Image: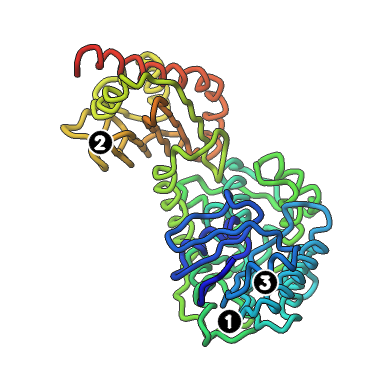
């Protein structure tokens, strides 16, 4: 593989931070990962599947690369992740040196003194990378506030689902969170030649406790203040079992992260070379939640059934005759004003009745023209095109919801999604999920039936 001059490589491009970074970088980017299909796309992005532990193969891939980001972490694989990370970092450093890479940029973790296995490993990786002789810019950060960050997702699920919590003393540990956008900006800036090699501690403008973080999230989300009782009896192991019961976060990761919660992770030596205005915690959380709403609407048809980053999704695919697809596209423009459009009118009538018990006041409305931003019943048109429509509402008591339809070839895909708000929203989704399995399929079939009727009428 021949690399172009000025090429930037991102190892671990398929991960949470890696995907964000690849989209933010200008110029040619080489995205590296084990599986090409897991790597992000982009106009200036090339992909390469490579095992970072294969030093010889990695050396060939890195030839001609000017700057290489190292965002690889083996914690999710469980077992002795520290030894695995040590070996992987040594392989990457050796390959970078042999390939003539000019600079390595690595994202590690804050912390001083007696560190957990997770934090100690993150800092050891930085040391291993520097041993090969390639200049290394090591950024050390704490909790990242962003949808998809494991630490943030643990915070989200715990705060959303538990109005009352019995927590160990680690909720009083000090932490200096950093907004996702700020972290990515620091990573991009680290590629500049005027940023010297070495360790740079980065963080947001506030030092808070994990208890403060949960209460701030609750306030931004519009939830009542959480009642939290601190007890000294919950060990990290017991805390991990408790977190596993409440959240869908990967168990192999949650235990290692919880072990780290007893260590203060704050900036002790601020780096003067990054002229980036830090984002306050509450603003970062609000920005994360708002960005997720737009992302769900834009990517609604790519979601798979289940829960991801606090969003529950149920997708249904049904066949539609090719001769009926023009009528089905026309029907997308006839939405609103009648419960019949949703397929099972009586089921939606019951849903509106249930909502009234919780203060909802939903009404029907058909716009003069369906366009993005138009009001359709209790929805807003979030995305719209010739073959698809995505509706979004924030008027439901249980959280924000999305309903989308797309005609693709001879398939009609229907997607329903809910970002539940609080314990009530989570209980609502779990309670109606078995019903949705039936109702959503009937709704999709009704869409096909109505399209066929329109086609028969010559519309």
User: Element type at marker 3?
Assistant: loop
Q: CA distance from mark 3 to mark 1?
A: 12 Å
What color scheme is it?
Answer: rainbow
Q: Quadrant of the N terminus?
A: bottom right
Q: Which mark is residue 270?
A: 1
Q: Which mark is residue 423?
A: none
* Residue at the image position 57 percent from the left and 49 percent from the top: 37
User: Element type at marker 1?
Assistant: loop
> What residue is disc 2 on?
375
Q: Nearer the viewer, residue 412 or 429?
A: 412
Q: Height in image: 240 above or below 453? A: below
- Are the two marked residues, 3 and 2, in contact with CB atoms closer than 8 angstroms? no
Among numbered discs 3 and 2, the one appearing first in the sequence: 3
Q: Nearer the viewer, residue 163 or 391?
A: 391
Among numbered discs 3 and 1, the one appearing first in the sequence: 3
* Residue at the image position 77 percent from the left and 58 percent from the top: 259
Count the marks.
3
Question: Is residue 405 something one can see in this rendering?
Answer: no
Measuring from the top left, give residue 266's x and y in whole percent: 64, 72
Q: Nearer the viewer, residue 356 or 318?
A: 318
Residue at the left extreme of this rendering: 368
> What residue is disc 3 on?
110
Among numbered discs 2 and 1, the one appearing first in the sequence: 1
Measuring from the top left, give residue 106's x and y in whole percent: 64, 72
* Residue at the image position 49 percent from the left and 45 percent from the top: 223
Task: Give neighbour class at mark 3: few <14, some 14-19, many 20+ (Cα, 10 Å).
Answer: many
Report whether 448 appears left or right of 241. Answer: left
Q: Quadrant of the C terminus?
A: top left
User: Element type at marker 2?
Assistant: strand
Task: Give neighbour class at mark 2: few <14, some 14-19, many 20+ (Cα, 10 Å).
Answer: many
């Amino acid at each position: 593989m021949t690399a172009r001059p000025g090429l930037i490589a991102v190892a671990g491009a398929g991960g949470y931070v890696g995907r964000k970074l690849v989209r933010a970088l200008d110029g040619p980017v080489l995205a590296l990962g084990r599986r090409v299909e897991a790597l992000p796309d982009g106009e200036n992005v090339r992909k390469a599947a490579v095992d970072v532990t294969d030093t010889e193969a990695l050396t060939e891939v890195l030839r001609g690369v000017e700057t290489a980001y190292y965002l690889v972490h083996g914690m999710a694989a469980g077992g002795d992740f520290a030894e695995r990370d040590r070996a992987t970092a040594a392989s990457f450093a050796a390959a970078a040196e042999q390939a003539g890479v000019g600079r390595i940029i690595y994202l590690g973790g804050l912390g001083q003194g007696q560190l957990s296995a997770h934090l100690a490993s993150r800092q050891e990786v930085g040391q291993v990378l520097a041993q090969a002789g390639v200049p290394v810019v090591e950024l050390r950060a704490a909790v990242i506030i962003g949808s998809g960050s494991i630490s943030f997702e643990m915070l989200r699920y715990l705060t959303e689902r538990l109005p009352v919590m019995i927590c160990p003393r680690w909720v009083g540990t000090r932490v200096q969170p950093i907004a996702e956008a700020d972290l990515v900006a620091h990573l991009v800036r680290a590629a500049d030649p005027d940023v010297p090699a070495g360790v740079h501690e980065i963080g947001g403008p506030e030092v808070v406790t994990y208890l403060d973080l949960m209460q701030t999230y609750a306030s931004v989300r519009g939830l009542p203040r959480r009642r939290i009782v601190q007890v000294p009896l919950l060990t990290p192991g017991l805390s991990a079992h408790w977190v596993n019961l409440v959240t869908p976060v990967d168990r192999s990761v949650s235990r290692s992260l919880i072990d780290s919660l007893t260590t203060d992770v704050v900036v002790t030596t601020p780096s003067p070379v990054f002229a980036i205005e830090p984002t306050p915690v509450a603003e970062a959380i609000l920005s994360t939640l708002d960005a997720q709403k737009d992302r769900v609407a834009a990517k609604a048809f790519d979601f798979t059934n289940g829960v991801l980053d606090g969003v529950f999704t149920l997708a249904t695919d049904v066949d539609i005759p090719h001769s009926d697809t023009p009528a089905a596209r026309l029907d997308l423009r006839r939405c609103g004003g009648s419960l019949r459009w949703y397929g099972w009118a009586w089921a939606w009538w019951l849903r509106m009745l249930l909502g009234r018990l919780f203060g909802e006041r939903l009404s029907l409305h058909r716009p003069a023209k369906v366009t993005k931003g138009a009001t359709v019943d209790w929805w807003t048109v979030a995305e719209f095109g010739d073959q698809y429509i995505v509706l979004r509402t924030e008027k439901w008591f249980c959280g924000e919801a999305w309903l989308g339809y797309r005609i693709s070839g001879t398939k009609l895909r229907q997607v329903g999604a809910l970002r539940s708000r609080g314990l009530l929203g989570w209980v609502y989704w779990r309670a109606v999920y078995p019903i949705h399995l039936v109702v959503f399929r009937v709704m999709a079939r009704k869409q096909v039936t109505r399209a066929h009727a329109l086609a028969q009428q010559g519309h």
